[in-house]
Image (cartoon, coloured by chain):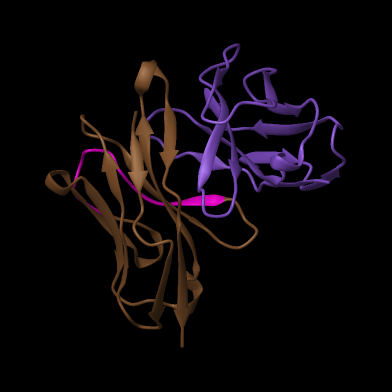
Amino acid sequence: NAGVTQTPKFQVLKTGQSMTLQCAQDMNHNSMYWYRQDPGMGLRLIYYSASEGTTDKGEVPNGYNVSRLNKREFSLRLESAAPSQTSVYFCASRQGASDTQYFGPGTRLTVL
Amino acid sequence: AQSVTQLGSHVSVSEGALVLLRCNYSSSVPPYLFWYVQYPNQGLQLLLKYTSAATLVKGINGFEAEFKKSETSFHLTKPSAHMSDAAEYFCAVSDLTGGYNKLIFGAGTRLAVHP
């Protein structure tokens, strides 16, 4: 049981490049989330997916797109990376509102 | 919308001293509340959660938190700090606005434990 996995762990991009962050969970959870973590700002929700086939914007969606490929996988795409997107990105999943939310190990992204 | 305020971005205690990390939430309905811990270069893991059962919730590693509706607080405590408790701690509340299931996080409190 791997929980929530993310790839890659580290990535360096140049301004304007694109990339996709991958996330998968093996707990059969309906809901999945993408957060970014910046110093002093806690975790801010980028996008979430309440169930397979649905996605919704969170607090900071600009510059990102997501795909809920199936129940297991939820990817985050940066179409044209900007230095302001330098951050640590976490994927998470959970079942219900009172349930524990499980986090992946994170992707550390630097945009030059 | 829900919000969470963590008082004190940095807290420093001596080993063996009481740990108190403060969290206040805004909610018009009884919330689900969580404390998560993040060790350096790792993801977040659950310490404990309140889901409208007992108001005093016990978690892992000797931590506990008390839900006080009158104060809209959910402060995290540990009677005796250990060096291994040094980490960042996040309080979070479930937000069911619009029928969707999201967690809203506070800005975090970094706990330092010194000998």
Q: Residue at x 25, y 34 (%)?
A: B27
Query: What color does chain A have in the rendering?
Result: purple
On screen, residue A86 versus residue B79, left or right, reads right
The x, y position of residue A86, in whole percent, is 72, 45
On screen, residue B51 versus residue B42, left or right, reads left
The x, y position of residue B108, in whole percent, is 45, 54
The x, y position of residue B76, in whole percent, is 31, 59
Q: Is residue B48 magenta?
A: yes
Give the residue at the far top of this rendering.
A53
On screen, residue A84 versus residue B113, left or right, reads right
Give the residue at the far bottom of this rendering.
B115
Q: Where is B46 relative to A36, above or below?
A: below
Q: Which chain is brown?
A: B
Q: How many numbered marks does the figure carry?
A: 0
Q: Where is B66 relative to A74, above or below?
A: below
**Can see residue A1?**
no
Give the residue at the far left of this rendering.
B70
**Can see residue B23?**
yes
Choose top left, top right, bottom left or bottom right for residue A65: top right
- Please tell me whether the stretch drawn in magenta is mainly helix, strand or loop: strand
Magenta region = B44-57
In depth, the one of B74 and A52 nearer the eye is B74
Q: Where is B86 relative to B64, above or below?
A: below
In depth, the one of A82 and A109 nearer the eye is A82
Quarter of the figure that contains the N terminus of chain B: top left
The x, y position of residue A7, in whole percent, is 76, 40
Q: Residue at x 35, y 43 (%)?
A: B4
Choose top left, top right, bottom left or bottom right for residue B111: bottom left
Q: Is residue A63 magenta?
A: no
